[in-house]
Image (tube, grey):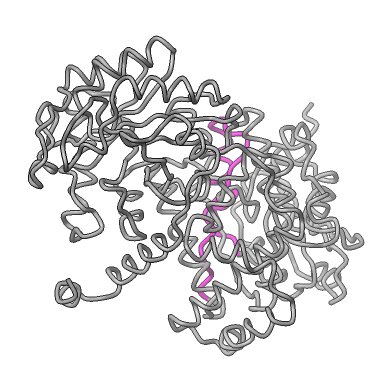
Amino acid sequence: MSEYSCRFSIVVPTYNRRDVLVESMRSLAALEMPWPVELLVVVDGSTDGTAGAARAVPMPLPVRVIEQPNGGAASARNTGAAQARGEYLLFLDDDMVADPRLLIEHDAVLGRGADAAVGHIPMHPDSPRTLLSAGVERWAKQRHERLARTSGKLALGDLLTGQLSVRAGVFAAANGFDEAFNADGSFGAEDTDFLHRLLQSGAVVSYAAGAVTWQRYVVTPDQYLRQWRQGGRADAVLARKHPALARTLAEQHGAGTLSGRVLSRWAPAVPSRLGRALAAYPVARARAGRTDLFTRWAFARVRDALYWKGLTEQGGWPAADAPVVLAYHAIEDVDDAVIGDWCVAPELFERQIDAMTAAGFTFVGLGDVLAALDGAPLPPRPALLTFDDAYASLLVSAAPVLAARGIPAVVLVVSDHVGGWNEWDARRGSAKLPLLTAAELQDLAGLDWAIGVHSRTHAHLTQADDATLRSELEEPLRALRALGLPVEPVLAYPHGEHDARVRAATCRAGYTAAFALEGRRPGSSRFAVPRIEVRRDTTPDALIAAALNPPRHPAREVAREVRGLARRVLPERVLRALG
């Protein structure tokens, strides 16, 4: 005989949202339930009459209202799960209005072998139309479209419990939610932690696209800002529990953007009184229901500042070694006024590699760095070798040096010029240097070299119009695959040039990461991974010094982002007039 007396136990934690909860319960009354179902409402220390109101809602299924002192969402969910009798647990936030087929859709996904499933949570049409609800609505729509496009591949930001089903046995084996995250009643991270642990255990977590609950978003601007500060504190705890997540969490919160770099550094140091004064005007506009561009931008910066302040209050990110990425071009001695500085003599290249090894650096492959961008650990002092343009000299001068030492590398290919020569430099009067053929690129791939992209024609991407930009990014992947090459969807920006528009286009084109030149060390943005450029006059000692303390060029970074913003907002004719 089964130990379960029903198919689903619906667990709804709630705190001081009586009217929102009652509306959600009424939607649950309309669920299609071809098997026994129960509802457990866990009232987490509410003082607004929630428990009595919940008991008064007429329901066609067994309902238990459980009251406990305020302990936070994790505690409330665990309390409900401990008293549940269902084979499957369905956790719902108290502001979710359920589609009648909600249980049917979860049952179908779990029945196909999933251990847990998250569903679609669009904005309820009756939600107040505010700056906040509009943002949540956009996020839910984009999340659904992305998950549908990727066959339900869940990213870290998708690990939410606003609507989550899980097998009761799997939940018990995972020891439920970690109540340390919000034992003080604060907000955030317990859901990400739980689902991350499930995935790490090998459990199958799927996206149930047809399982829909509409969120009645009634959070005020002040509540929202408190949640973001609490969220920063919670993420600091989460990153210490799971250090591999720190880099992805930082990227999710804009650590690689100009505003993110400024706020993450300076917001925690701003005295509270000054911070409140600076935030007063945009917060007042948000309270008044303003949704204009300025209000959205300014309020988002206040939100981000509070996130970084909360993160710092809880100790910040755990320390981690980020990879040093070296950018080479040709490995040959070229006496040329145009490109000679970017050509490293073979003898110097060998001394540079040996000096890096002697200094304790460990050369890693592209796969290791991509995994690290997703949170995987790297060895101490990791370094990655990249070679732009795919010069023919790599096969005869660089590959033997690296093969003898078991060192992997990455070659970045200009797809229109495979087997040709460096036309983009020759137009400036440089020497013509041959480039690797498709067969030679295959030979490198057999020597533990990864093959990436360096655009279609080596164009200045930041100056390209939208159509040209798409072609420069999308065509190389198709062309190199058509040649039978095992190309990885990584890009090195020609001339190191990028801005917000180029980075967004790179992501849309299907790349998983992109290399820049100057900038912060890796980890702040996977689409602007900085590199140290190695030139003909870079001595081994100078290279080690740069690797230990990568150079920063903040003025260039600011100028680049300002130019990129101008290209996004100014009409094309104005840009042409400005030159």
Note whether 175 is above or below 140 in the view shown: above
Q: Where does the image place residue 217, in percent across and percent down from the top left?
A: 60, 71
In reply to whether residue 103 is colored magenta, the answer given is: yes
Note whether 161 is above or below 262 in the view shown: above
Q: Quadrant of the C terminus?
A: bottom left
- What span is in magenta? 97-125
Quarter location, residue 226: bottom right
Is 71 left or right of 297, judged from the image as shown?
right
Q: Where does the image place residue 137, in percent across and percent down from the top left?
A: 49, 67
Outermost residue, top direction? 404
In reply to whether residue 551 is colored magenta, the answer given is: no
Which residue is pictured at 78% across the width and 52% down the height? 181
Is 341 left or right of 101, judged from the image as shown?
left
Note whether 412 is above or below 119 in the view shown: above
Quarter location, residue 61: bottom right
Q: Where does the image place residue 183, in percent across and percent down from the top left?
A: 85, 55
Which residue is pictured at 83% across the width and 63% down the height? 43
Which residue is pictured at 70% across the width and 43% down the height? 194
Is 414 left or right of 76, judged from the image as shown?
left
| Between 546 and 573, the one nearer to me in the picture | 546
Note whether 260 is above or below 117 in the view shown: below
Q: Quadrant of the N terminus?
A: top right
| Between 209 and 356, the one nearer to me in the picture | 356
| Between 424 and 289, the one nearer to me in the picture | 424
Outermost residue, right direction? 69
| Between 255 and 517, the one nearer to me in the picture | 517
